[in-house]
Image (cartoon, grey):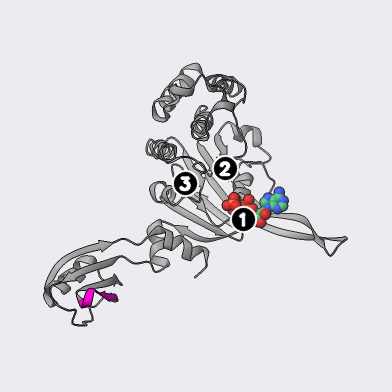
Amino acid sequence: MIIEATGLRKDFTVRRKVGRFRREKHVVSAVDGVDLAIGRGEILGYIGPNGAGKSTTLKMLTGVLTPSAGRARVCGLEPVAQRVTLARRIGVVFGQRSQLWWDLPLAESFSLLRHIYKVPAADHAARLKRCTALLGLDEFAQTPVRQLSLGQRMRGELTAALLHGPEVLFLDEPTIGLDVLSKQAVREFLAEVHAAGEATIVLTTHDLADIEKLCRRLVVIDHGRVVHDGSLDELHARYGSRREIVADLDAAWPGLTLPGAQVTAVENDGRRVRLALDGATAGEVVAALAQAVPLRDLSVQEPEIEDVIARLYRRD
Ligand SMILES: Nc1ncnc2c1ncn2[C@@H]1O[C@H](COP(=O)(O)OP(=O)(O)OP(=O)(O)O)[C@@H](O)[C@H]1O
């Protein structure tokens, strides 16, 4: 495992105003006993509602915050104690903090990073060439960072995080606030980095398209605890979101019961029926339907990921 955490916790002590003059100490358990085991080459979405503890977890895994309890290992290292060694083996993009020099052209930030990380010139050039091609950096490589748009800056940040050839990439909301094209460019880039097996990728996101297009595995956290760890399909199965068959009929629906499917709606004066798959395959249900009623048209509708995530966050 390239990332391991057991019983990881982070408590913050905050002072809250009580009445007009008094302040009371209050403990917030931002991360409340998280276990994680992430293998080399995985691409994982770490998701959850606002304040769930995502950023705090990433900060502990990257050595920025000391855990209150529990243990973490990234690339076999202890993040806080071995932070400097770890920094050479991971890449980090956190929305609020930039690794770029504000007043310098983007290209100069990249050269400075090469010297800081002591990356061999040939390796640096090869990685930069690839990022330039995939992220279209040429257009703004000579522009000072402070003049870049958010989308351009994010492309620069991703490049900066990858130039030293990290084994793990931690990304906190890499697509937040970006325009549609930049989002797409970032997603395609990450998919490519994943497919090439270059780095293990852990990203937090609120963007459902990021989840759908990128995250083979989802760890869902709520109130500092892991509430789901598995694929998106498993999430659909667990939260009861089912594929639906919509059948248009040449005659009124006779009110049958079909094994492994549930009628969820009858519409259009009985000439359209919706059936949620509940154990049977789409093929089995379609075959049974075709035997029972004259069919005009059929479609299979996939459950919406929005519904699943919303239900999960509401803890239905
Ligand atoms: N430095 C801090 N001091 C006090 N409380 C904090 C601190 N950092 C985070 N918290 C609290 O810890 C909890 C988890 O915060 P965290 O930023 O990890 O959540 P998140 O899942 O990343 O949320 P979001 O999706 O809104 O970014 C929140 O209740 C937050 O207010």
Circle 2 SS class: strand
Circle 1 SS class: loop
- Mark with earlier residue (2, 1): 1
Determine which of the numbered discs, if any, sits on residue 51 in the image.
1
Q: Quick check: 305 left or right of 72?
A: left
- Residue 68 makes an appearance in the image: no
What residue sits right under mark 2 in the picture?
74
Identified at 47% across, 62% down, the residue is 310
For ligand 1, tell me if the residue under mark 1 lies within 8 Å: yes
Please say if 302 is above or below 253: above
Q: Quick check: 114 left or right of 258?
A: right
**Residue 257 appears at what percent x and percent y?**
23, 81
Viewer-proximal residue, 165 or 82? 165
Circle 3 SS class: loop
What residue sits right under mark 3 in the picture?
39
Please say if 249 is above or below 165: below
- Mark with earlier residue (2, 3): 3
Circles 2, 3 touching at the beta carbon (< 8 Å):
no
Q: Which residue range is magenta in the image?
A: 264-270
Picture quadrant of residue 52? bottom right
- Amino acid type at circle 2 is Val
In the rendered image, residue 283 lying in the magenta stretch gets the answer no
Name of the residue lying farthest toward the top: 121
**Residue 110 appears at what percent x and percent y?**
54, 22
How would you rate the neighbour count of disc 2 (Cα within 10 Å): few for under 14, some for 14-19, many for 20 or more? many
- Amino acid type at circle 3 is Gly
- Residue 242 makes an appearance in the image: yes
How would you rate the neighbour count of disc 1 (Cα within 10 Å): few for under 14, some for 14-19, many for 20 or more? some
Mark 2 or mark 1, which is nearer to you?
Answer: 1
Q: CA distance from mark 3 to mark 1?
A: 26 Å
- Mark with earlier residue (3, 1): 3
